[in-house]
Image (tube, grey):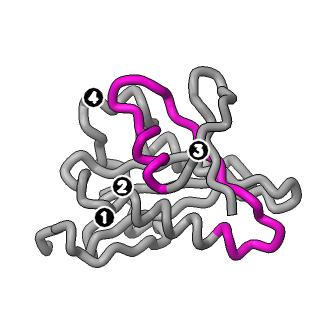
Amino acid sequence: MTTVTKDSVVSLKEITEDTLRPFLKMKVAKDQRNLVAENSISIAQAYFSKNARFRGIYADETPVGFMMWAENTEEKEYFLWRLMIDADHQRMSFGAYAVRWLIDYIQKIPEANELMVSAVPGDNSPIPFYEKLGFVSTGKYEGEELVLKYSF
C-alpha cells in the first residue's frame, strides 16, 4: 500500500462488495464520534432510501473516506447527507475535494439551485469547514443540526 500524503491524487469511486471492507473499518477522531454516523449505518440507510447516493473517497488507491448525498430531482432538493474522513487521513484536504466534487456534480443537474448540508454546532463542529467551502447558514435547524446551503 502506498503512503497517503496531502499531495495524493483524490478520486471518488463506487463502493462494491469487493471494496466494502475498508470503509466499514474507518473511524473518525474520538472527539468527532458524536458528529457523524459510522459508514456501516450510512451504507445501510442508503440502500433503503430511493434518493441516496454514495461514493468512497480515495487518495491514490487508498480508501480514506466516505460521502453520501440525497438527490431528489423531482423536488429539486440536494443534500450532503454524510461526509467522513478516516481519522488517520484528516487535515489533508480530502474532505474538501469530495465536497467540491459534489458541488460540481450537483451544479450540472438542470434546475439545481443549491446544495444543503447540516451540522451540529459546538466543539469540533464541521460548520467552519463548510463555510470555508462557500456554504452559508440558513438560520434553520433540523433537530439540533444547523442547516447550511451552497447556492449555484
Q: Which mark is residue 75?
A: none
Rounded to the nearest whole Å, what is the CA distance between mark 3 and mark 4?
24 Å
Give me the residue at 51% from left, 69% from top. Answer: 101
Quarter occupied by residue 27: top left
Mark 1 touching mark 2, by CB under 8 A? yes
Q: Which mark is residue 31?
A: 4
Q: Which residue is mark 1?
A: 63
Rounded to the nearest whole Å, what is the CA distance between mark 2 and mark 3?
30 Å
Tell me the crowding category of disc 4: few under 14, some 14 to 19, or many 20 or more residues within 10 angstroms, Cα based. Answer: few
* Image position, residue 11 (x, y; %): 39, 74
Secondary element under disc 4, as helix, strand or loop, is: helix
Q: Which residues are magenta?
A: 106-133
Q: Amino acid at mark 1?
A: Pro
Q: Amino acid at mark 3?
A: Val
Q: Is residue 29 left or right of residue 129?
A: left
Q: Which residue is mark 3?
A: 136
